[in-house]
Image (cartoon, rainbow, N blue to C red):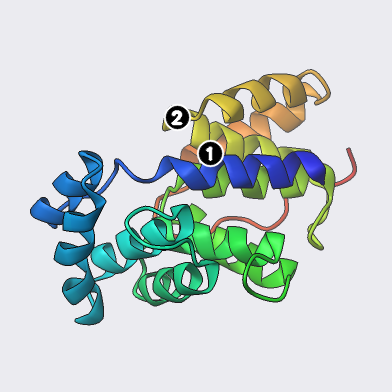
């Protein structure tokens, strides 16, 4: 469980450079001109723009341009997550998982991770894979689903998922690996991810 928490906390810092739109605010943020970024994105976030809400939430989470405030970070990310912003859904899941600024709730964490993972969010896919692999947060242990999720994340360039997939493959039968690969191949972004496999749950 400690390994999963560390992985989630590490990944929280990886979303600052992946912002589309909001040209002035995003450019200012990436240039570390946080005062200008705050000026540009705050009115957009207040107007309901999910990208701006995610960026403002990130600024509060990291303490960039504002005093670090996890409650504000959660509030802004939650607004963006409700609009379907995958990055924000992942952060909401991570904050529920760690109990950061909200009561710890691993079931809610799983729900938000799954929402993001179903939009091909690699960090969320990686986190869900860890939950299936290590049987945490109420998830059944299922090697095949873990492999599938890490396979999907690895396809997006997630290095840790690539490494975990290689480790778990050494503990799986050929039948299990083939099922995991087939699940990965047949899954389409935007559709529900499977919750259990045929061959992996007893591994």
At label 2, counting other C-alpha atoms closer than 10 Å, the crowd grade (few under 14, some 14-19, many 20 or more) is some
Counting labels gives: 2
Mark 1 lies on a secondary structure that is helix
Residue 16, given in percent of the width and then of the height, sits at 34, 45
Question: What residue do we see at 19% from left, 50% from top?
Answer: 26
Residue 12, given in percent of the width and then of the height, sits at 51, 48
Direction from residue 146 to residue 92 in the image, left or right: left
In the rendered view, tell whether residue 89 sits above or below residue 78. above
> Where is mark 2, residue-wise?
155
Question: What residue do we see at 69% from left, 61% from top?
Answer: 97
Question: What residue do we see at 25% from left, 42% from top?
Answer: 32
Nearer to the camera, 120 or 69:
69
Q: Quadrant of residue 93?
A: bottom right
Nearer to the camera, 96 or 31:
31
Residue 146, given in percent of the width and then of the height, sits at 69, 41
Residue contact at pointers 2 and 1, CB within 8 angstroms:
yes
Q: Quadrant of residue 175?
A: top right
The residues tagged by marks 2 and 1 sit, at their Cα atoms, a distance apart of 10 Å
- Identify the residue at the far left of this view: 24
User: Is the C terminus in the top left, top right, bottom left or bottom right quadrant?
Assistant: top right
Mark 2 lies on a secondary structure that is helix
Which numbered disc covers residue 184? Answer: 1
The reply to whether residue 59 is visible in this rendering is yes
Direction from residue 71 to residue 88 in the image, left or right: left
At label 1, counting other C-alpha atoms closer than 10 Å, the crowd grade (few under 14, some 14-19, many 20 or more) is some
């Amino acid at each position: 469980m400690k390994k999963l928490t560390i992985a989630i906390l590490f990944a929280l810092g990886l979303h600052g450079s992946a912002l589309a739109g909001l040209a002035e605010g995003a450019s200012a943020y990436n240039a570390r001109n946080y005062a200008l970024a705050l000026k540009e994105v705050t009115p957009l976030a207040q107007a309901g723009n999910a990208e701006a809400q995610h960026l403002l939430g990130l600024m509060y989470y990291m303490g960039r341009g504002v005093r670090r405030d996890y409650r504000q970070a959660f509030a802004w990310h939650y607004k963006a997550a409700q609009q379907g912003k995958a990055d924000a859904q992942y952060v909401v899941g991570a904050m529920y998982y760690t109990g950061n600024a909200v009561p710890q709730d691993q079931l809610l964490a799983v729900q938000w991770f799954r929402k993001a993972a179903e939009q091909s969010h690699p960090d969320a896919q990686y986190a869900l894979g860890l939950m299936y692999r290590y049987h945490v947060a109420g998830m059944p242990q299922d090697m095949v689903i873990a492999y599938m999720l890490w396979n999907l994340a690895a396809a997006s360039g997630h290095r840790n998922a690539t490494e975990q997939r290689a480790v778990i493959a050494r503990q799986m039968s050929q039948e299990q690996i083939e099922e995991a690969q087939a699940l990965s191949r047949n899954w389409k972004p935007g559709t529900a991810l499977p919750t259990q496999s045929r061959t992996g749950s007893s591994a």
